[in-house]
Image: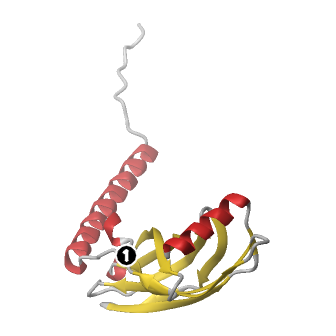
């Protein structure tokens, strides 16, 4: 007579290995998350701030032919309010324009600001002769008569700072503001121009 046999299911060693590896990875991820959280609570990282500290209209000239020439001094202040971490700034770039027409691009190489310190980036901006269409010629003429000429400054920098041995935090600081000057005495009319209001 044929015998009836029963087969009990057995788990493959490969499945056991996969389960153990997944469990180890999960534990590592959880521990890593706890360490990062603790690091944030201890270091309490703060986003660095970029702002316009000062500016000056060194030179402004336009003629009846419709050519504009200008020179400006712009001082950017970079602040790192972190008490326990240095901040690294990279890909720093600002575009200066007048009524939508690009005048110059301001750049800076990678630099570091130590904890609880600030530094200044002075830019001397000299434009090439810029041809103006009739509309822009009228705009410049009106600005000079009103004794207020406005330039646009847009750009920013990529920042990162280390959270102890746990890795680094990355963020972008951006500026988008107007710089106003008085052509009569070349002075800068101070106005808020900072990345801090975005955070």
Q: Residues within 10 Å of mark 1 (few under 14, many from 20)?
A: few
- Viewport quadrant of the N terminus: top left
The residue shown at (49%, 71%) is: 146
- Could you tell me residue 60's position as x and y percent? 63, 83
The one nearer the camera, 13 or 22, is 22
Residue under label 1 = 191
Work out which quarter of the rendered image holds the C terminus and state it: bottom left
In this picture, is 28 found above or below 57?
above
The structure residue drawn at horizontal position 48% and vertical position 75%, both measured from the top left corner, is 179
With 37 as the anchor, is 47 left or right in this view? right
As drawn, the residue found furthest toward the top would be 1
Q: Check disc 1 and report its element: helix, strand or loop.
A: loop
Q: Nearer the viewer, residue 44 or 189?
A: 189
Is 173 or 127 nearer to us in this picture?
127
Q: Residue 117's x, y, as percent?
A: 34, 92
Query: Is 170 above or below relative to 56?
Result: above
Residue at position x 61%, y 69% in the image: 140
């Amino acid at each position: 007579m044929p015998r009836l046999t029963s087969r009990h299911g057995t788990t493959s060693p490969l499945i056991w290995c996969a389960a153990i590896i997944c469990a180890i990875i999960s534990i590592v991820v959880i521990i890593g998350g706890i360490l990062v959280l603790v690091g944030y609570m201890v270091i309490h990282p703060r986003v660095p701030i970029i702002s316009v500290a000062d500016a000056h209209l060194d030179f402004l000239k336009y003629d009846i032919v419709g050519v504009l020439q200008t020179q400006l001094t712009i001082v950017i202040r970079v602040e790192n309010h972190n008490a326990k971490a240095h901040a690294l700034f990279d890909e720093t770039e600002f575009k200066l324009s007048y009524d939508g027409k690009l005048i110059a691009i301001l750049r800076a190489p990678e630099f570091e600001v130590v904890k609880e310190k600030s530094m200044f980036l002075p830019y001397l901006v000299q434009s090439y002769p810029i041809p103006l269409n009739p509309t822009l010629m009228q705009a410049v003429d009106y600005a000079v008569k009103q004794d207020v000429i406005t330039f646009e400054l847009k750009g920013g920098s990529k920042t990162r700072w280390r959270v102890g041995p746990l890795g680094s935090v990355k963020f972008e600081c951006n500026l988008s503001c107007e710089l106003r000057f008085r052509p009569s005495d070349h002075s800068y009319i101070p106005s808020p121009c900072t990345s801090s209001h975005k955070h």
